[in-house]
Image: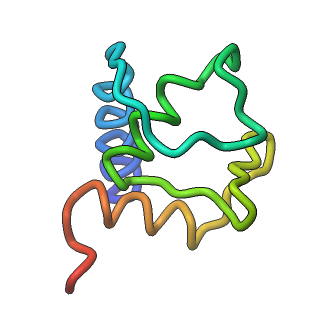
């Protein structure tokens, strides 16, 4: 039940970042501006909640690991220094 609440919190926060914003963050070579989630990826990268891989790649079709998911949740709730 706790995981479900964290999951809902995480996706609520992600949804709140889906507001259109013209802030330019790091551009990933595999996420063109016409990509369906470009604005969201750009915003979350700018907020330092997500980051790409080496060589300026984001790999948007890659499934995330449990560790990557945990890192995003921890960054989202501001607990990365614990």
The quarter of the displayed image where residue 78 is located: bottom left
Residue 17 image offset from top left, x and y in percent: 32, 29
Residue at image position (49%, 23%) is 39
Residue at image position (74%, 42%) is 29
Residue at image position (36%, 19%) is 22
- The quadrant of the rendering that contains the C terminus is bottom left
Residue 14 image offset from top left, x and y in percent: 38, 35
Q: Point out the residue furthest to the bottom here.
A: 82
Relative to 40, residue 81 above or below:
below
Relative to 50, residue 24 above or below:
above
Horizontal side of residue 27 vs 12, given as left or right: right
Decide which of 6, 45 is in the foreground and name it: 45
- The quadrant of the rendering that contains the N terminus is bottom left
Decide which of 69, 18 is in the foreground and name it: 18
Residue at image position (73%, 53%) is 57
Decide which of 56, 3 is in the foreground and name it: 56
Residue 47 image offset from top left, x and y in percent: 31, 47
Q: How is the image coloured?
A: rainbow
Relative to 79, residue 26 above or below:
above
Horizontal side of residue 60 vs 42, given as left or right: right
Residue 80 image offset from top left, x and y in percent: 27, 76
């Amino acid at each position: 039940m706790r995981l479900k609440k964290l999951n809902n919190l995480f996706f609520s926060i992600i949804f709140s970042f889906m507001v259109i914003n013209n802030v330019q963050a790091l551009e990933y070579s595999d996420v063109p501006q016409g990509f369906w989630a470009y604005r969201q990826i750009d915003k979350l990268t700018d907020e330092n909640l997500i980051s790409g891989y080496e060589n300026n790649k984001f790999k948007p079709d890659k499934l995330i690991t449990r560790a990557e998911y945990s890192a995003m949740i921890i960054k989202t709730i501001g607990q990365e220094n614990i």
